[in-house]
Amino acid sequence: MAKQETVKNQNEDMQLDKYDKKYFKFMQEYQSKAALSAFESFRTKDVTTIENTLRQLSMAVTSNMYIIGIGCLIIEREKLYIKAGYASYFEYAQHLFDDAELPTSTLSAAKIVMEKFIDYNQQLKRAGFHLERNASKLLFLDEALKNHDEEEVYRHIVEDTYRRFKDWAQRRSLIEHKPEKQVQVEAEIKGNKLLVAGKNILNFPRGLPKTVKELIKDDLQKTFSIREGGNQPYIVSTYGRGEQVAIDNFLKSSRAKK
């Protein structure tokens, strides 16, 4: 009986060795305490144990993203990128991507999340919102406020799952004021030229970042679309999306009374 157990243990050791060679021989340079602890849990081949480890790792990554987001927000709002020799935050973000291998999409998402969390903190806190495991919902907060009643938005962002909140935020409320005439004017960038409705209306200087070109294109496209719809564009400075939504709601209410 003892001999059979010895053979069984030897077979298990051989199987574990093969398992190690299959997955962990490539990870020899990762010898941090967190990595070694994670690898030990992966060796159990128990899906619940591995999933719990993945959850812990994701929380650590998410926490770092919060910090990255605040840093990016400070650089943008305090215009620190100018001291670094960059004309815009967009150019500086590209520098971070090139130098630190931080994808611009990741930087953008992290910055937006922390921007919304700071700008709407009072409302979020009052609703019982916690950043942990809810951060990604903030990417759709502006859209939710545009399409739904504010009180409903903060209830949903607390109670809904990420997927449910995202879908709800992007769906317009059934109770709306009469729709405005929507006209879409086509705009496109060809090289250093901006075409609106097929006509060249602007020549970009050489070397202008693509992100800046896209911003200009989107702004002008929206302006032309508003005019084509029979309305007049009006640019006003706001502190954030909350003020923009308040202005939109005021205009809708005012028009509904006419």
Image: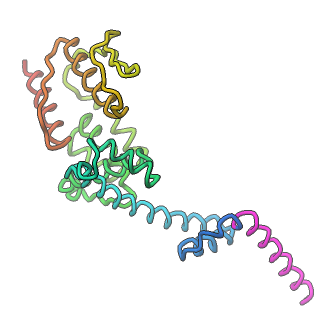
Which residue is at 26% across, 59% downward?
A: 128
Q: Looking at the figure, which quarter contains the N terminus?
A: bottom right
Q: Is-magenta flag for residue 101? A: no
In depth, the one of 251 and 25 nearer the eye is 25
Q: Is residue 94 above or below residue 193?
A: below
Q: Which residues are magenta?
A: 1-24
Q: Is residue 161 visible?
A: no
Left or right, 232 with reference to 182: left
Q: Quadrant of residue 69?
A: bottom left
Task: Give the percent coordinates (x, y) of residue 89.
Answer: 29, 45
Q: Is residue 236 above or below residue 119?
A: above
Whether the magenta-drawn stretch holds residue 23 is answered as yes
- Left or right position of 151 against 29: left
* Direction from residue 187 to residue 148 in the image, left or right: left
Please tell me how many numbered marks the rendered image carries.
0
- Residue at 15% x, 32% y is 249
Residue 206: give x, y in percent of width and height.
34, 27
Q: Residue at x 15, y 21 (%)?
A: 233
Residue 3: where, in percent of width, then height? 92, 87
